[in-house]
Amino acid sequence: MLCFTRHANSARLLPPEEAQQAHTIRTGQDKPYPYRWFTPVALIGATILLVLLSVMNFVQNSYRLEVTYADNPNSTTTNGIWYSHWPSYLTNSVRPTCQPANLPVGTQFFTDQTGFTWTLTSVWQPGKRTSASPSLPYLNNPLEQCNIRDIQVSFGSSQLVQTAQSLGTIVTSTDIQVRAFVTCGIWSPTGYMKFNATAMYDTISPNAVAGTTAFVAQNPAAKASVYWAEVLLSAYWLQTDGIAGGGYFSTYSPYAGKGLVVLYPNPQQPNITDLNFFNMTYTFLSAKTDHPVDLTLSSGPLAPLSHYANRGRLSDLLWRPLDGLTKAMYSAVLTDLGQTDAPAESNIVASEQALQQFSTNLSAIDFLSDFYHLPLIEDSDFNTTQHSDDATGKLGLTRSVISTKYLCQVPRRRPWGDVFIAVLLADLVLLQAAWKLYTFAVDQAMTRVRVGSKWCEGCVGKEEGGEDGVAEAVERAWGRWYGHAKGASADVSGMRTSGTSFS
């Protein structure tokens, strides 16, 4: 008994033993499968797969990334496309990303509180042997653990501001500059970093216009604490200048030259309303007003500010206005850097009671502002202002971030026509691959379950009869093949008998 195997270009007879070893007959796409469930499963599966593939291909092909600059990388990366929270292996190519900003040492920056202009002086990473870093990698992380190391008030030489015609005198200014030195920490993309920065305040600096803000911007409604911090700074600056700079109090002032006062926060006294809040030391090179060439060098050792303010000397009139100026600077720095964890009692503009106490003498300082033609930002105390039409917003601190630009990649949708073509082509390719896999799996399963399909087409479904059923199917297939072969041979013989030749 013989069986046959079908090859691409030829057919040959095999003994049954060899036919059982030659697994070359497969159920292809040119004949129906002997399973009733094959077509419904194929249609339902194709429909479900088409939907899933279309969604996946839409995610992959409907958007492209474009480069742009953003102020807030957090909102840029979170407020993306509707499927941005899907698994990254599906949306990685269209997920918005932002690169960290690089702030080299010496860079000037300001925070989102729009207060001081800061200068970055040094950067390092705690715990690293090579700690110094030339720049600060920054990705919109809040500033934290900011420590005000000291505040320095420098007094420059007197300079002409204006002539008071009504009084017949010359009004001068001492060119007072207030500097704060801070150390802050942030979490950067490379780990926890610390940096030093400085800020300077000067009411009549070249970068400030008299009577306007010396801060980056003012917003009394939304950022009331920052606004009132500058109100106090400008007022106490004028009062301190009036004492030290040869203005209205020039007859009593021995500080007509240059000097430096350094104040350190007193860790033993967190209440900013106390005169012992700062420890201070000073050095002055001064000249008497009636003898300009008679220079005097004076200095004071490190001691609480109250020690100098309560000595009872006429020359010590400077220290109380200076106390208000430096405390206003201290509060402004905490507010601008968003140090919400700092004790409320150490910040004037975090407490309505403290702010009212420090703003009660604004009307008296307003006399100096008229004398200098440098109008105050506010000439009324906090409570009076809040009950007027010029009321500001509610006091309060929020965490601060450095304001800068970030290079980002954000998804932009392609034209709908391009999206349709891309999704259609991708669906066709993947559906064809799925169909090949489906038919291959069914073929493999059928050759395992229906053993006869390994030998011949007619053997499929005959395995229920055992070897006899298979043998019968093989003989029937062999008979059909033999009959066709015999008929073809007779035709050829007849043509030869009749003398037909082939050339």
Image (cartoon, rainbow, N blue to C red):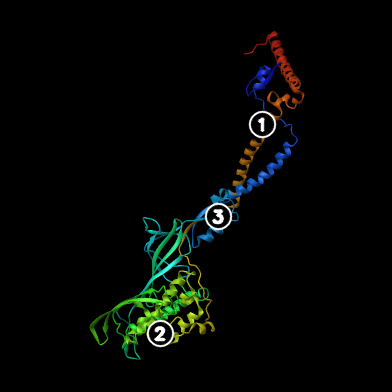
Crowding at dot 2, Cα within 10 Å, few <14 / some 14-19 / many 20+, comes out as many
Q: Position of residue 318 (x, y in %)?
A: 35, 83
Amino acid marked by disc 2: Ser
From the image, which quarter does the C terminus lie in?
top right
Rounded to the nearest angstrom, the CA distance separating label 1 from label 2 is 96 Å
Secondary structure at badge 3 equals strand
Q: Which of the two labelled residues, at mark 2 and mark 3, occupies the earlier sequence position?
A: 2
Relative to 293, does residue 110 appear above or below in the rendering?
A: above
Say if residue 209 shows up in the picture.
Answer: no
Q: Position of residue 330 (x, y in %)?
A: 42, 74
Amino acid marked by disc 3: Arg
Q: Position of residue 418 (x, y in %)?
A: 58, 49
Q: Which of the two labelled residues, at mark 1 and mark 3, occupies the earlier sequence position?
A: 3
Q: Position of residue 238 (x, y in %)?
A: 39, 82
Secondary structure at badge 1 equals helix
Q: Which residue is tagged 2?
A: 369
